[in-house]
Image (cartoon, helix red, strand yellow):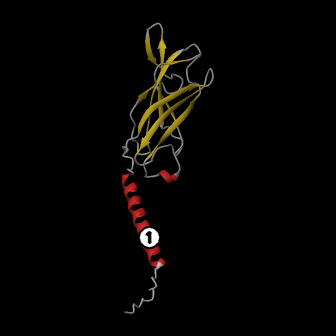
Amino acid sequence: MVVMEAPPQEVVIDRDKNHNKNNEMRFVIFFILTITLLSCAKKPNYSEIPQISYKSFNILSQDSAIITITFSDKNGDIGSLNQEGNFFITYYFWDNSLNKYVVFSDTTLLNDTIDARSFPSPSDAYKNKPISGEISLLMYPYRIDNTIKKLKYTCYIKDNAGNQSNIVQTPELYAP
């Protein structure tokens, strides 16, 4: 009996075909992961009416200080376009004779209790887009005279559509 061996068959592996399938699979997995991650990222749900919160008050010298608030706005229409006031501050000082806080009234010009300041608009890239951040405003002077040692402020902002934010109050502040 003669056993004939079959010649060895050559196995051909199409590496390009397997390589293409692996690349396709990697792309599909990457695509699914990307879509999943992007769907998890939520757009901020800010109000059209600006919202603010008090952050800090830093005294720089006998007559200057910086007040900082945080803000959010749905459509990015904050900041002064033409130097009109958009940051409104009411100043209160402790009156020792009355044993309470008294609102400061500016009798020199408008007999007003609200000081209107302005801060600039953010870049045009934020128009009609949600925005949040900080506003720091230099206050010079921050009190009517150096004898005032205990004071506080309330403040709010307005957006360009005229929407007034909530009003925030600083804690009691002690001046040197």
Residue flagged by tag 1: what amino acid is it?
Asn
Image height check: is 60 above or below 136? Answer: above
Q: Is residue 170 left or right of residue 146?
A: left
Q: At which x and y percent is residue 55?
A: 48, 30
| Residue 140 lies in quadrant | top right
Image height check: is 104 above or below 52? Answer: above
Which residue is depicted at the point 49% across and 27% down? Answer: 110
Q: Secondary structure at mark 1?
A: helix
Tell me if I can see residue 112 in this picture: no
Q: How many marks?
A: 1
Q: Quadrant of the C terminus?
A: top right
Which residue is more in the foreground, 88 or 151? Answer: 151
Tell me if I can see residue 99 in this picture: yes
Q: At which x and y percent is residue 117?
A: 52, 34
Q: Classify 10 Å Cα crowding around label 1: few (below 14), some (14-19), many (20 and above).
A: few
Residue at image mark 1 = 22
Farthest residue, direction bottom: 2
Q: Quadrant of the N terminus?
A: bottom left
Image height check: is 62 above or below 132? Answer: above
Farthest residue, direction top: 97
Q: At which x and y percent is residue 44?
A: 39, 47
| Residue 50 lies in quadrant | top left
Which residue is depicted at the point 36% across and 55% down? Answer: 39
Which residue is more in the foreground, 67 or 114? Answer: 67
Farthest residue, direction right: 61
Which residue is more in the foreground, 50 or 42? Answer: 42
| Residue 157 lies in quadrant | top left
Which residue is depicted at the point 56% across and 26% down? Answer: 58
Q: At which x and y percent is residue 166?
A: 38, 34
